[in-house]
Amino acid sequence: MRFFKPKKLHVFDTSGSLLVSLCVLLIGLKTSVKYYLARLNRKEVKRNQESPPEAIFAVMDKPTYDKSVAYTLTKSRFEILTDFTDAGVLVALLVSGILPKLYTYVMSFGHESSAWLGALFILVTTLLLSFISLPFEWYNQFRIEAQFGFNQSSLKLWISDKLKGLLLSLLIGLPLLAGILSLVNWVGSAWWIWGFILLFVFQLIMLVLYPVLIMPLFNKLSPLPEGALKERLLALGDRTGFKAKSIQVMDGSKRSAHSNAFFTGFGKFRRIVLFDTLIAQLSEEELEAVLAHEIGHYRLGHIPKSLVLSFLGTALSFGVIAWLATTPWFNPAFGFKAGVLAPTFLLLGLVGSLVTFWISPLFNLLSRKHEYEADLFAKKAMGNAESMIGALRKLSSKNLSNLTPHPWYSGFYYSHPTLLEREHALSLKH
Ligand SMILES: [Zn+2]
C-alpha cells in the first residue's frame, strides 16, 4: 500500500523534482531544436539571396523578393526571441511554486471541490500568461507588420479586440470549463468520456454559431455583391457539386493587408468567406481558382477527416488527464494534491506541447497532402493549371512569403507546401 501525504509533498521532493527536471529538460530540447531549425532556415534564405533561383522572378520582381527576405529574417529573429521568452516563463512557472500558491489562493474563496473555482484558477493563469505575451503581440503588429506595410489596425481597435476576447473567455470559456470539471462530481471516474463528448458537441455547435455570433463582433460580413464575379463563383459551385448557400466578404483589410479565404460551418450551415483584400488582389479567374481549391477541401472530405482527428486528439488528452490526475506522482510533483482535476488540466495545457511538438510534423505532412489534393481538384475544375498558379504567385508576392525555406524547416512547420512545390505539382500531367 502506498501512502500519500499531500502536506509533506512540495516541488523539491525527489520524485517531484525528477518530473519537474524532466520538463525543464524537454523545454530546453524543444527550444534548442526550434532555434536550430530557425538558424538553418535563416542561412538558407540568405544563401539564396546571393544567387536567387531563376523560378523566383516569375513570382516577384527583385525589390519585392528582397523585401520578402527582409520580412522573413525580421519575423524569424522575433520568433527566436519569443521562443526563448516562452521557455523562460514556463520554466519559471514550473519551478517557482507560484502555481500551487495561486491555486490555494483561488480555492480559498470556496469549497475545494468547486468546479467554478477550479475553472477560474485555469482561466486566471491563462490570462496572466497572455498578459506577458501582450507586449510581444503589440510589437509584432505595430512594429514588424507595420514596417512591411501589413498593419491596418489602430491601437484602439487592437485593444478593443483584446477586451472582446477577454469577455468571450469569461462568458463562454469559464462556464464550459466549469461544466467539464463538475462532471467528476456527477459521474465519477467516467467524467472524461462525458467531458470530451461535451467539448465535442460544444465544438460542433460553435462551428455553426461562430460565424453568426462571434465573427460579427470582430468583423463585418456582407454578401458578395451581384455581378460577374458572383455569377462566376456560383457557376463554379454548380459545376463542382457544391451548393453554396452564400458567399460572404469579410472586411479583413480593417486589421491587416494579408489575404485569405475560408469555409465556416458544415452541412447546410456552411458558408464561404472571402477577405476583401483577396478580392482586391486577384483577378476573377484567380478568385475562382482559389474557391475551387476550397471546394476541393470540402468535396474530398478533408473537413470531416480533420474533425475526426481533433475528436481523437481531444479524447486522448482527456483520457491522459483523467489518468494523470489520479496518479500519486503527477500533481504532487508540481506542488498540487493528487486527485484534483483543475491543476492537471492546466499542467497538461502547459507541458502538453513538449510532447505534441514532436508529432506536429506528421499533422503538417497530412495537411500538405490535402493541399496538393485540393490544388489538383482546382486544376481539374478550372480546366487549366495557370489560374491556380497565377493566384498562388500573386498571394505569395502580396504576402511576402518566404520562397526559399530550408526543406527541414518547411517539412517540420509548414501546413502548406511551398509555392515552388505547389507549382511543380500543378504543372505535372495528371
Ligand atoms: Zn487549402
Image (tube, grey):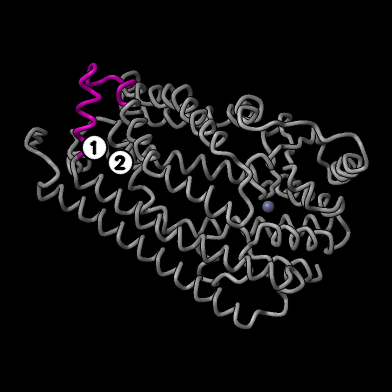
Q: Position of residue 424 (x, y in %)?
A: 73, 71
Q: Main secondary structure of the magenta part?
A: helix
Relative to 72, 211 lies left or right: right
Which residue is at 73% across, 39% downward? 273
Can see residue 39?
A: yes
Q: Earlier in the sequence, mark 1 or mark 2?
A: 1
Which residue is at 41% across, 42% downward? 316
- Of residue 83 and residue 370, the one placed in the foreground of this image is 83
Report, in whole angstroms, how far the alpha carbon at label 1 lies from the one at label 2: 9 Å
> What type is the residue that disc 2 sits on?
Leu
Element under disc 1: helix
Quadrant of the rendered image containing residue 417:
bottom right
Quarter of the figure with the C terminus: bottom right
Relative to 223, 191 lies left or right: left
Q: How many marks?
A: 2
Which residue, given by chain and number where applicable, does mark 1 sit on? Answer: 99
- Of residue 171 and residue 394, the one placed in the foreground of this image is 394
Which residue extends farthest top? 110
Which residue is at 39% across, 56% downward? 83
Q: Position of residue 303 (x, y in %)?
A: 64, 43
Up/down of 128 relative to 425, above or below: above
Relative to 157, 428 lies left or right: right
Q: Position of residue 286 (x, y in %)?
A: 82, 54
Q: Position of residue 150 (x, y in %)?
A: 63, 51
Q: Looking at the image, do the residues carrying marks 1 and 2 touch, with CB atoms under 8 Å apart? A: yes
Quarter of the figure with the N terminus: top left
Up/down of 303 relative to 382, above or below: above
> What type is the residue that disc 1 sits on?
Leu
Task: Answer yes or no: disc 1 within 8 Å of ligand 1.
Answer: no
Can see residue 328?
A: no
Q: Which residues are magenta?
A: 98-118
Q: Which mark is residue 347?
A: 2
